[in-house]
Amino acid sequence: MILSSMENVVFGYGESPVVNGVSLDIHKGEFLGITGPNGTAKTTVLKILLGLLKPWSGEVRLNQEAFDGEKPVIGYVPQNASAFNSGFPSRVIELVRSGCHSRLGLFGRFGSEQERLVRDSLEQVGMWELRRRRIGELSGGQKQRVCIARALVQCPNVLILDEPTTGMDVRSRTALYRLMKHQVRHHGVTVVMVTHGLEEAGRYLDRVITLERLETESVETSANIGKTAADDRWEMG
Amino acid sequence: MGNGVTAMLAYEFMQRAFLAGALIGLIAPILGIYLMLRRQILLADTLSHVSLAGVAAGALTGMNPSVGGFAAAVVAALLIERLRKGYRTYAEVPVAIMMTGGLALAVVLMNFGRTLSQSFNSYLFGSIVAVSETQLWLIGGATVVGLLFFFVFRRPMYDLTFDEEAAGISGVRVRTLTTAFSVLTGMTVAAAMPIVGVLLVSALLVLPAALALRIAGGFLSAVVIAIVVGLTGIFSGLTVSYFYNMPPGGTIALILLAFLLLGIGLQKASVFIRRKRGVTEPSI
């Protein structure tokens, strides 16, 4: 089932478009990779999908049926999520708890169910042991993992990750791909991930969309490449 | 000294000053934490300058100058939010535009009413006796509204402050909340002017927050530390300025600055001693 689609989308920041006639579909319950060389507007395409940028022309559709008529919960880990203000006064656990805010609303009580979700999310990214640490004291890769835990704690229908492995070592990167694959297989989450590391991530992805810069200096999708299913063993280091 | 303090508090203008200081000391440091984390600290200075133009306009038109300053700060806050749309890449540009415009307007308006110049000193540098009953009501109103705002919207404000984009995707009404936040900043800045003056109003916002952000472990503890530091600085500043006939704005700002430097020094000393003793954070 198509979850979201983009048709003939044109967008630019100045006078000329950086995205020109891009069309793509996202299927429910898939682990989709978006890749392409630098400057192919991968982040821009994600932001258009998320509704953060309005296209000059073309259509972006969200299939409400795919969410059983309910409001979709989207977990988003932006590019350079780890570059957040290091002086932000929070410990790891406090920041991840804040991922529950959207579900709790203004006055909802933070109960044992939320505590369990926070613990699960932190354990999944291997950060439970460091939950009391100030976020400013973490390494770039650790910060990135905390941001992923904060997205997971929302129990999202869709997870959108923009180059989430920045600053991570090989072991953490592999663990992340396995975790995302697990989310897709066992929790029905749709994961869209912008990545440069196809040689590593490729075996875990269900499908890859490659953005390429054309002669016109604008970007189009070039191909949808089917991938083999990866094993779903997962563990975070 | 005890009798001196009792005598000081017997004066009605000092009671008003302490009450106004307590109210501002509650709200300004909280606001300062959000402004610092959102990298918008220049906003406070800008709104105080625009507020000065409002004070002049109010005095010239026969309106209460304090109400004029209050209204100008709120309108300017709304305008800055609107201008931010057009300068997404350079978010500080609309702030600089408003600061220049506000100060220029204040100078020109002051020229029209030369008798205003004298009373302007109390707005520029703050004056204990400048706190009128109207101002006290304005300060009270701004504080109550501010405290309610930060209590009710503590969750979306936390999300917004950490990552505006991600907050928007998770359902936070970013535009409404940032506009309300800017208006609240305008109200607080205008309300704080009679105590510390236009030129030092950002001291009340920046200095307690700067110290709290350095030493606090969590968000709530940062808020509590900032309030305690702010209130202590204001009360001791008002007391010193009364006994030694010093300008309250400058005295409060200097005391807050001393707290900040002392806090940084103690923090560095603590880290040094821990290193000497070989206490290290657990590694992973």
Image: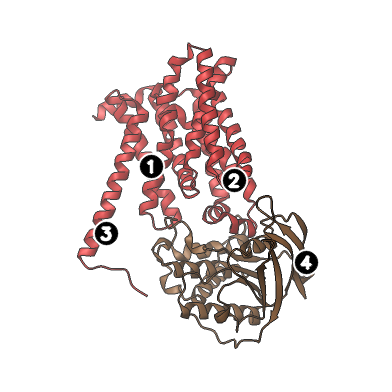
Chain colours: A brown, B red
Q: Nearer the viewer, residue B158 or A14?
A: A14
Whole-Å distance between the Cαs marked 1 and 2?
A: 23 Å
Q: Do marks 2 and 3 share a chain?
A: yes
The reply to whether callout 2 and callout 4 are in contact (CB within 8 Å) is: no
Q: Which corner quadrant of the image does residue B276 belong to?
A: bottom left
Residue wearing tag 4: A64
Q: CA distance from mark 1 to mark 4?
A: 49 Å
Query: Of label 3 and label 1, which has the lower sequence position?
Result: 1
Label 2 vs 3, first from the N-terminus: 2
Check if mark 1's residue and mark 4's residue have beta carbons within 8 Å: no
Q: Secondary structure at mark 2?
A: helix
Q: Which residue is mark 2?
A: B178
First along the sequence among labels 1 and 2: 2
View extreme (top): residue = B115
Q: CA distance from mark 3 to mark 4?
A: 54 Å
Q: Relative to A102, does residue B190 appear above or below in the rendering?
A: above
- Residue type at mark 2? Thr
Observer able to see residue A3? yes
Q: Which residue is mark 1?
A: B207
Residue at 66%, 87% in the rendered image:
A228
Between the C-alphas of marks 3 and 1, the distance is 22 Å
Q: CA distance from mark 2 to mark 3?
A: 37 Å
The chain holding disc 3 is B
* Residue identified by numbered label 3: B271
Name the element at disc 3.
helix
The answer to which quarter of the image holds residue B118 is top left
Amino acid type of the residue tagged 4 in the rendering: Gln
**Label 1 near label 3: C-beta < 8 Å?**
no
- Say if residue B184 shows up in the picture: no
Query: Residue B284 appears at what percent x and percent y?
Result: 37, 75
